[in-house]
Amino acid sequence: MTVKSSKSAAISKLFLSMTLTCSLLLIACTWRGAIWVEQYSTVTHLVFGVAERRLGSEPVIVRSMTLSRRVATEPHWKWQSVWSYNTSDIPQSRVLYNGSPLSAGYYAVSVELDRGRHGETEFTVDTMGNIVEHIQTTRE
């Protein structure tokens, strides 16, 4: 009977461990967030898309957004915040930038969604005012 009890206890522990691992993976997968520059955005009409996944359409609750510009300082680069956005509990899938028109340079925008989810992207504004997003880059 002891052998059966130990096997049964081991199987129960294994099942519990697998259940816990799967639950944690599911939770981790839902804690994603994404932000991107909407197609046809310009420096005078810059729109960011926000969702759980890149190019998603399901509205999410945006807690805050920060737009930063990369500036040169000797001997390194640093990020200077140029715009912040805070909102209420209204789900949305797009956020319109309503700050001053952006000058030529390299920018990063980050978003904090509900439940601790977050996302980030970077883009360049060229001297003609065109915006080019740099997909899947990491912020220094």
Image (cartoon, rainbow, N blue to C red):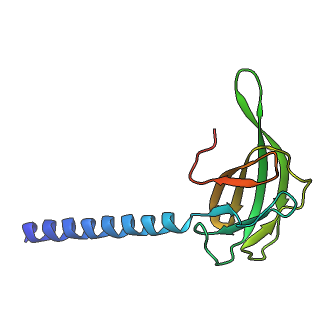
> Which residue is nearer to you in this view: 66 or 49?
49
Location of the C terminus by quadrant is top right
Q: Residue at x 71, y 21 (%)?
A: 75
- Up-down: is 38 above or below 110? below
Q: Residue at x 71, y 31 (%)?
A: 77
Residue 58 vs residue 21: left or right? right
Q: Residue at x 14, y 65 (%)?
A: 6
Q: Residue at x 69, y 77 (%)?
A: 59
Total marks drawn? 0
Q: Residue furthest front?
A: 128
Determine the image quadrant of residue 24.
bottom left
Residue 12 vs residue 19: left or right? left
Location of the N terminus by quadrant is bottom left
Q: Percent position (x, y) of residue 17?
A: 32, 64
Q: Percent position (x, y) of residue 18?
A: 31, 67
- Up-down: is 121 above or below 22? above
Determine the image quadrant of residue 131.
bottom right
Q: Percent position (x, y) of residue 72?
A: 76, 29
Determine the image quadrant of residue 36.
bottom right
Q: Percent position (x, y) of residue 63?
A: 75, 64
> Which residue is nearer to you in this view: 140 or 116?
140
> Which residue is nearer to you in this view: 86 or 107?
107
> Which residue is nearer to you in this view: 131 or 62?
131
Q: Residue furthest right?
A: 100
